[in-house]
Image: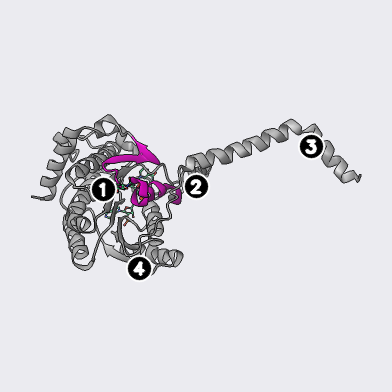
Amino acid sequence: MSNYSESVKDFVESHVIGLICIFSAGAGLVAFRRWMGGRVCKSKVRLDGKTVLITGANTGIGKETALDMAKRARVILACRDITKAYIAADMIRQRSGNGNVVVKKLDLASLQSVRELAKDVEKNEARLDILINNAIMMCPKWKTEDGFEMQFGVNHLGHFLLTNCLLDLLKKSSPSRIVIVSSLAHERGKIHFDDINLDNDYKCDISYRQSKLANVLFGKELAARLQSGVTVYSLHPGVIRTELGRHLFPTMSLWKRIIAMPLMMLIKTPWEGAQTTIYCAVEESLANETGFYYDCARKTPAPQAQDDAAAKRLWDLSASMVGLG
Ligand SMILES: NC(=O)c1ccc[n+]([C@@H]2O[C@H](COP(=O)([O-])OP(=O)(O)OC[C@H]3O[C@@H](n4cnc5c(N)ncnc54)[C@H](OP(=O)(O)O)[C@@H]3O)[C@@H](O)[C@H]2O)c1
Ligand SMILES: *[C@@H]1O[C@H](CO)[C@@H](O)[C@H](O)[C@H]1NC(C)=O
């Protein structure tokens, strides 16, 4: 035997415990990262001839969801920043091989913009099979064009009006689905019925949680109001590396980035983060489920998200705020 293999053998023999530890730690880390990534939607169902509309599809989870949908159907990216949306649409067309991807302007912080988009879709689209309410605003104390607190206004009210304006087309296209991207943050949320815009005591996280609880309550009430044929799903996508914090932490110093890097490795990628949305949008076995909440699989939401009276009260309040008769 050569000297070389002799010394490798010696090394392995004398470091056997250390090597086993390193190997197991590596395997453990890989398994842990996989587990963190959550469940992958395996459905290969095609949606030829069908149309999917996704809000906030120019980045983050929305863009990944749109890419997956483009492999199955016609896709409308309803976006505020149109330049970013065209760039996303180009990428999606290229990577999906589907040229049937269009961009439409939608600013959820403007009721007029919501109504204009809905009118455009009603007039120019033959059908709408899946509506995905994904866009999100996480920000300081800002106001929408109509004077609503921004996070409640964009995350809930804008989508509330949009969904209602598109209901006729969704019904005509049934079986159709409405998917509402909420968050685990709803669990610590509360609807401040007496100060819905949080004028008296604004805190970004309180407002964010309120808007995400509103998403789940809206899904529940909407499902109760709809006849069979249009089903509704709300969900938590996981914790994901996206632009979510951009208005709160616009700049992070270099050393903070370096410290955050190993943590970022553990957080879901946008592709992993899109899986529960895709699951709710296409999974055949969910065809007869409506009004439920999902986190990879069906899950019971927080008690305040199961409150029928609150869901009804929020519906009435929202309808009067956006001027729905
Ligand atoms: N990331 C997470 O860890 C996490 C955790 C739980 C839940 N979620 C949920 O996942 C969904 C997607 O979040 P994300 O992390 O992908 O966020 P993101 O990267 O910040 O993307 C948000 C999207 O919403 C759009 N948007 C913001 N304001 C808008 C407006 N007024 N009108 C129309 N579109 C608007 C943005 O468009 P512009 O570029 O034009 O601003 C962007 O496309 C959200 O519902 C969020 O609550 C995310
Ligand atoms: C849903 O319900 C319809 C009508 O009752 C039934 O034909 C169909 O098999 C059901 N689908 C699933 C996935 O349960």
Q: Which residue is mark 4?
A: 100
Q: For the residue carrying disc 2, how many other residues have a C-alpha within 10 Å: few (<14), some (14-19), or many (20+)?
A: few
Task: Please report the residue visible at 42 percent of the width from the left and 45 percent of the height from the top.
Answer: 240
Alpha carbons under labels 4 and 1: distance apart: 25 Å
Q: Which residue is mark 2?
A: 254
Quarter of the image where one finds residue 10: top right
**Mark earlier in primary sequence (4, 3):** 3
Numbered badge on residue 297? none
**Which segment did they paint magenta?**
271-299
Q: Which residue is mark 3?
A: 12
Task: Please report the residue visible at 50 percent of the width from the left and 41 percent of the height from the top.
Answer: 266
**Quarter the N terminus occupies:** top right
For badge 2, the amino acid type reads Leu
Alpha carbons under labels 3 and 1: distance apart: 60 Å
Label 4 or label 2, whichever lies nearer to me, is 4
Numbered badge on residue 231? 1
Mark 4 residue element = loop
Q: Is residue 31 left or right of residue 60?
A: right
For badge 4, the amino acid type reads Asn
Vertical comparison of 87 with 21: above or below: below
